[in-house]
Amino acid sequence: MSINLRKTEKMTVYCQPDKEKNVITKETETVKLSCSYSTTSNEVRLFWYRQYLHGELLFLTYRGPDLRLYSKATKEIKHVDLIIFSASISDSALYYVLCSPQ
């Protein structure tokens, strides 16, 4: 998934997917969702969200009760991954990234 960043008056940067990418896997397998971004800000915070069909956006944390989710960012190449360990049917959803300058 490739994204564009846009600055707003409040200095929040929103990531918009250029195109959708479907990932198909089997239950219990590890899934990696990748996102590249571009920005003029040197430091950004990256937040992953999940949205079930016709549902609201749900914030995902990489540390919390669900240890199957892990997020890793590489600021030198402006790239962030979301890794889902032991995928399950309940992980079927749309995933988004929100970027905000620190």
Image: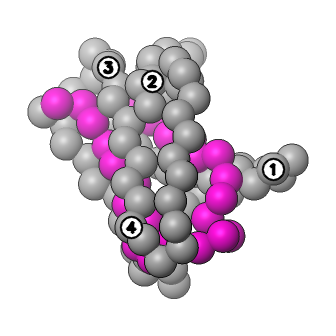
- How much space separates mark 4 and mark 1, taking CA atoms? 22 Å
Cα distance between the residues tagged 3 and 2: 8 Å
Give coordinates of residue 3: x percent, y percent.
45, 24
Q: Are marks 1 and 3 in contact (CB under 8 Å)?
A: no
Q: Which residue is mark 1?
A: 53
Percent from the top left, x then y, of residue 50? 63, 53
Q: Contact (CB < 8 A) between labels 1 and 2?
A: no
Question: What is the three-letter code of the residue carrying label 2?
Answer: Ile
Judged from this view, the residue extending furthest toward the left is 76
Q: Quadrant where the N terminus lies? A: top left
Regarding mark 3 in the picture, which secondary structure is present there? loop
Residue 4 location, quadrant: top left
Q: Is residue 96 left or right of residue 69?
A: right
Badge nearest the viewer, 3 or 2? 2
- Does residue 77 appear anywhere in the picture? yes
Residue drawn at 51 percent across, 84 percent down: 65
Comparing 96 with 22, the one in front is: 22
Distance from disc 1 to disc 3, alpha carbons, whole Å, reads: 28 Å
Disc 4 designates what residue?
30
- Of pointers 2 and 4, the one earlier in the residue sequence: 2
**Precedes in sequence: disc 4 or disc 1:** 4
Callout 4: few (<14), some (14-19), or many (20+) C-alpha neighbours within 10 Å?
A: some
Decide which of tag 3 and tag 2 comes sooner along the chain. Answer: 2
How many angstroms separate mark 2 from mark 4 (CA)?
23 Å
Q: Which residue is mark 3?
A: 38
What is the crowding at mark 3: few (fewer than 14 residues within 10 Å), some, or many (at least 20)? some
Give yes or no for contact between labels 2 and 4 (Cβ–Cβ under 8 Å): no
Of circles 4 and 1, the one toward us is: 4
Magenta residues, start to end: 77-102
Mark nearer the viewer, 1 or 3: 1
